[in-house]
Image (cartoon, coloured by chain):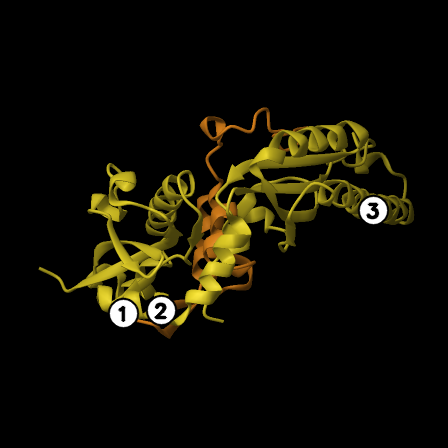
């Protein structure tokens, strides 16, 4: 029975910064919960042009695992 | 050569060209500073074949491409945040040229300054609370005598899990209350999809905390205290990271 790793921070100096898990990074870089909800707005030249559905991404992840 | 766009990673204050010497942008391209008033945009050239509307639509659905872009974006943001107040942009914020970048910095000047004021000398920490997975029914289902017993056992198991999740929610609130005592701001994020995050158990808390650099150790000690106080859940803390959740530049 394995639990997720208990990643308690051991130090607070930048040198010890852990790499950010991709899912945590996408939570932040694409907007809150976007990967699960499936929507992201891309800004191109100051105008929000593209609304993308990321359900295909979720599919890819499932197939990989 | 494909038409070029300008990829904006972040907006900083007090960043000099010398400070970003050695940092490279996506695809190993040169990083440039675009200055407007007291703000500096960090940009690099990208091919619009890859990063234009058409290309993005295609590429954002390829996990490998997305990961590479997110990692490349993060590398620049991390490097900048280590030396200057930094407000990151969303992934794939692309302009046709530097004038368009400057115009955006002008239009959003006050909002950007407010974001930079908020995060200056602060870092982001992620704290999640997850239930511990319990071993599923200790008795093999096959030895249960009847269908009714089986259903009863299943129901009991389900109820135990629900009660466990409820308890974990209560614990998560206690953890959160303890942590907010030393943070400048906090933000709750939706629980992550286990298919993406790969965790077991139920994620009952997923939050970002903005912590002053000088209070990092205090925050870490608090997290450790909470971990010890609540052995029945998993407290997963990570950081420090750039203040993504507290300075994201967004049009909406």
Left or right, residue B87 beside residue A36: left
Residue occupying the far front of the picture: B37
Q: Which residue is mark 2?
A: B106
Q: Chain of mark 3?
A: B
Q: Which residue is mark 1?
A: B100
Left or right, residue B195 beside residue B88: right
Disc 1 versus disc 2: distance between alpha carbons? 10 Å
Q: Chain of mark 2?
A: B
Q: Residue at x 36, y 69 (%)?
A: B106
B215 lies above or below B245: above
Q: Count neighbours of disc 1 (C-alpha within 10 A) and say few if under 14, some if 14 to 19, many if 20 or more.
A: some
Q: Chain of mark 1?
A: B
Q: Nearer the viewer, mark 1 or mark 3?
A: 1
Q: Element under label 3? A: helix
Contact? badges 3 and 2 (CB < 8 Å): no
Q: Which of marks 2 and 3 precedes in the sequence? A: 2
Q: Which of marks 2 and 1 precedes in the sequence? A: 1
Q: Nearer the viewer, residue B2 or B30?
A: B30
């Amino acid at each position: 029975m394995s639990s997720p790793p208990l990643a308690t921070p051991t130090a607070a100096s930048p040198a010890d910064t852990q790499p950010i898990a991709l899912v945590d990074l996408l939570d932040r870089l694409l907007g809150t919960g976007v990967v699960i909800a499936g929507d992201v707005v891309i800004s191109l030249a100051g105008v929000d042009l593209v609304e993308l559905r990321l359900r295909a991404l979720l599919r890819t992840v499932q197939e990989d695992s | 050569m494909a038409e070029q766009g300008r990829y904006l990673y972040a907006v900083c204050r007090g960043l000099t060209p010398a400070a970003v010497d050695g940092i490279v942008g996506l695809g190993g391209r040169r990083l440039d500073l675009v200055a407007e008033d007291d703000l500096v945009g960090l940009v690099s050239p990208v091919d619009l074949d890859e990063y234009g509307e058409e290309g993005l639509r295609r590429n954002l659905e390829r996990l490998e491409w997305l990961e590479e872009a997110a990692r490349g974006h993060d590398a620049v943001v991390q490097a900048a945040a280590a030396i200057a107040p930094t407000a990151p942009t969303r992934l794939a914020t692309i302009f046709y040229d530097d004038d368009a970048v400057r115009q955006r910095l002008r239009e959003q000047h006050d909002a950007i300054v407010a974001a930079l004021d908020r995060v200056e000398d602060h870092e982001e920490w992620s704290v999640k609370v997850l239930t511990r997975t319990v071993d599923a029914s200790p008795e093999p289902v096959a030895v249960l005598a009847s269908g009714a017993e089986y259903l009863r056992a299943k129901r009991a198991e389900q109820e135990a899990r629900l009660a466990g999740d409820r308890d974990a929610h209560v614990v998560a609130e206690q953890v959160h209350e303890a942590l907010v005592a030393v943070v400048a701001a906090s933000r709750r994020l939706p629980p992550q999809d286990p298919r993406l995050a790969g965790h077991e158990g139920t994620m009952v808390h997923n939050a970002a905390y903005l912590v002053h650099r000088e209070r990092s150790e205090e925050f870490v000690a608090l997290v450790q205290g909470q971990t010890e106080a609540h052995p029945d859940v998993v407290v997963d803390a990570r950081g420090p990271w750039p203040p993504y959740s507290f300075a994201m530049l967004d049009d909406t």
